[in-house]
Amino acid sequence: MKTVGKSLAELHKLLVNKEISSVELTREYLDHIREYEPKIKAFITITEDEALKQAEEVDKAIAQGEEIGPLAGIPMALKDNLCTEGIVTTCASQMLRDFNPPYDATVVSRLKAAGAVLVGKLNMDEFAMGSSTENSGYFPTANPWDLSRVPGGSSGGSAASVAAGEVPYSLGSDTGGSIRQPAAFCGVVGLKPTYGAVSRYGLVAFASSLDQIGPLTRTVEDNALVLNAIAGHDPLDSTSVPFNKPDYTQFLENNVRGLKIGVPKEFFGLGLKQEVAAVIEQAIKTFEQLGAKIEECSLPHMEYALPAYYIIAPAECSSNLARYDGVSYGYRAEADGMIEMCKTTRAKAFGQEVKRRIMLGTYALSSGYYDAYYLKAQKVRTLVKQDFERVLAQYDILLSPTTPTVAYKLGEISDPVTCYMGDVYTIPVNLAGLPAISLPAGFTDGLPVGMQLIGNYFAEGLLYRAAYVFEQNTGYYKEIPGLLREAD
Amino acid sequence: MSYQDKYEMVCGVETHVELATKTKIFCGCTTEFGGEQNTHVCPVCLGLPGVLPVLNREVVNLAIKAGLALNCEIAEFTKFDRKNYYYPDLPKNYQTSQYDLPICKKGWVEIEVIGKSKKGGITRAHMEEDAGKLVHSGDSITASDSSGVDYNRTGVPLLEIVSEPDMRSVDEVIAYLQELVQILDYAGVSDCRMEQGSVRFDVNVSLRPLGSKDFGTRTEIKNLNSFTAVRRCLEYETERQAAVLDKGEKVIQETRTWDENQGVTLSLRTKEEAHDYRYFPEPDLVPLKIDRDWVERIRATLPELPAAKRERLKGLGLSAYEAGIITSNKAMAGYFDQVMQKYPEAKVVANWIMGDLSALLNAGNQSFEDCPVKPYQLADMLLMIDKGEISGKIAKTVLEEIYSSGKDPAAIVKEKGLVQIKDEGALEKIISEVLANNPKSVADYRGGKEKALGFLVGQVMKATQGKANPELVNKILKEKLK
């Protein structure tokens, strides 16, 4: 029985009907991982023993006639910046290569409670800083659609593992597009929830006011099922919002008639590749044919979002990463004296991009520069937010490309600013704290193109509905990378 | 020559006081003092990757209470900020503190020096987390080849109270600090255990020529942990600055440290080397709105504060000095009030508390908090004096007995036969004997030497082991000597 590639609902049915056990299912995925990892390299750690133990427990529950939840007994993997008790959590950094957290992130304990089977921890750009996973402190990950290309980042391992069928779903984190951009590059569905919808407790912080955890899946329905398990207020995160969490699958109806979709013209400007624009224009037509009302709209301050983000995110990062000093955990360099030890530790164990952002942020917060940089960036952030609020008062959702380009070649982009420009459509959403989803909009030259849908605060349900309608009527989710087809 | 002949001192103090919560400011760990190293810790106060702070509401309650007790305005909107600096006792290498929107501002305390009183302004008070403690392998950091960190104290809530530069003498500084600590102790916002480091002071001090209105260049001396240290340090530092100015040189703006053993201040870092703390709003905590109902609920829990208590005690007939002594110690003041409930003679109660009882406690190394003589026992004893059941002299013995045995005064008097002799017949007999044994004194008295009577009274008291009623003794003696 070939289970890889099946939806969560299908896998759940197989388990409940005892057509397969969780242990068998887990072994099947582990075999698949072993087969494809040499090419994809999505995993930093594979947790076979823990996975089989968890699977056995679910099997026991099934054997005892217990009712199991929709994620129980089904394998999954986590971006390696989510703390897992007793399982090394590296953030793809040499700094934390041996760091074993003594606690689980809230999303991890929620998934554990749901019976999820953790099969491993996924590669990423070091401390989630980057857009290609080439900034991993260990190795780059390949894009399953073209092994010579990047999977995007920073949740590159999370997107590549799902696209390669190594896991049915994964969790990633998104600070400026780090779920949506790799989802777009790898042709999967990635959601960045509303800021405060999912607890950040146990997510190793990059930029606290922007970070959110979200699911990466093959289908919209799968995505809603995972969000069901991880969203909701957490008293351990003061920025998590107490809200009435719905069952997100209830929004999955095949109807967008009358839905008002705004298309912000600023998201079709500079840097957008013609072939990407063509796929998105076709997607807009599809929505129109399905009965949605499409109009062009404007978010006038978008051009300032990227520079503001590159002040705020590094500023927070410079403070959040100050704790890695070699004193009580993580890598420690041998050196004479405490100050030298701390300096050498940081010089040796952080990669180039992390150092660059720490320096940018330290500078932006320095006395004499604070007002000109950090304070001004915060004001821009308010303007960006107000732009979205104004437009979202008129439209139900906004539609844009997720990225200006498709996945580029490994090593193709070395200039950081060019790399930063790739997040120009995703970053404004983080500044505003809104939810957004990226889903496959079509293909160009055999590479997936992602479409971004942006919704109002806590309107994940509406995003799922629009995404679901598009997905069901286009069927792009059925496409699988050539790599997997050859194997079949 | 003292600096005061030429210069006036200007001083302001930053006081760090531990708030009396059961748990830490951002996690559930205990704030208890001591404990095995690194046992009062969790991922949150250790600042491990991925953790987030959750504000302890009781910290805000106590900060509001302190602010009210110090006549501060309580902010309607306040927030936390990160103060970024590297030090191994600071696990996140930033301290979560408050920068531009502190919870309390614009307060004052009354300070009094030799009968002259003035207001010592308080600029602001803000909430923050404490750091850990470095444990050196040797006697000092320089004499150690390694150091460890004890994180038990990390995350203990602090209130930093910043004064205006209002103090003009060392005595004023000490008066300000004593009043401040007393208020915080009374209000119950802190245990104020100086010996456990729960109150620490940073002083900012400068000199200016007498009559000048401008401030001179100041130095900051950090981490003083007692009034004595503050006094000694300021006495040294003012003379040091005066010597610099006398030579026509300039005082360097810098942070200094107090070396207790050598009795000197030493340069720690200059202005150029000062930290740039890169403050910015703490993104892991949401700003706090403090509605006025909240403030009023806290105000309703404020107990009587030292200044009010002193005034009340003066109203009861105590001198300013007595009122000052009684209120200087919260437990003593509470003890006084309890005795007064049963025996409302302020002067008498104050004398016994400040005198004999304090002496007993000092000798026994005890305090009013754990005083073995219960307030009702002292009151009962004082009532027995008034009723003539015991003499004031005997009462001293009775008090000692209550102190050591814990028994009630009536029982002690009965057991030890300390009841006053008021039987005239019995006294007459004793007095006749005394007169017979002291013919010279009798002759002296009859010859006009009034003083001789006192000696004879003393002899009667001696013969009765102090139990004779003094009034009766006087009366009978005078009759017999006619």
Image (tube, coloured by chain):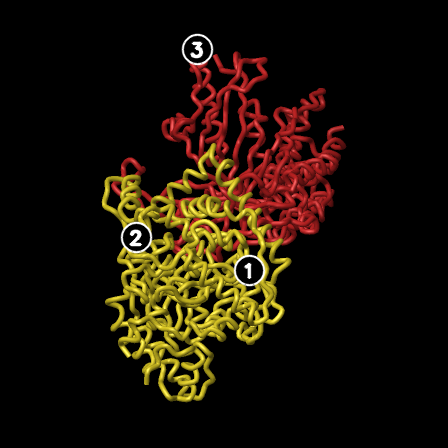
Chain colours: A yellow, B red
| Foreground: disc 2 or disc 3 | 2
Residues A227 and B202: in front is: A227
Determine the chain carrying the residue at label 3. B
Q: Which residue is mark 3?
A: B248
User: Badge 1, how many Cα within 10 Å: few under 14, some, many 20+?
Assistant: many
Q: How far is mark 2 from mark 1, CA to CA?
A: 31 Å
Three-letter code, disc 3: Gly
Residue in view at x 72 percent, y 38 percent = B312
Three-letter code, disc 1: Leu
Q: Which residue is mark 1?
A: A398
- Is residue A34 visible in the rendered image? The answer is yes
Q: Which residue is mark 2?
A: A412
Q: How far is mark 2 from mark 3, CA to CA?
A: 66 Å
Instruction: Describe the element under mark 3 as helix, strand or loop.
Output: loop
Residue in view at x 53 percent, y 62 percent = A197
Determine the chain carrying the residue at label 1. A
Q: Position of residue B289 (x, y in %)?
A: 63, 49
- Is residue B420 visible in the rendered image? The answer is no
Instruction: Describe the element under mark 2 as helix, strand or loop.
Output: loop
Q: Quadrant of residue A334?
A: top left
Q: Position of residue B151 (x, y in %)?
A: 39, 50
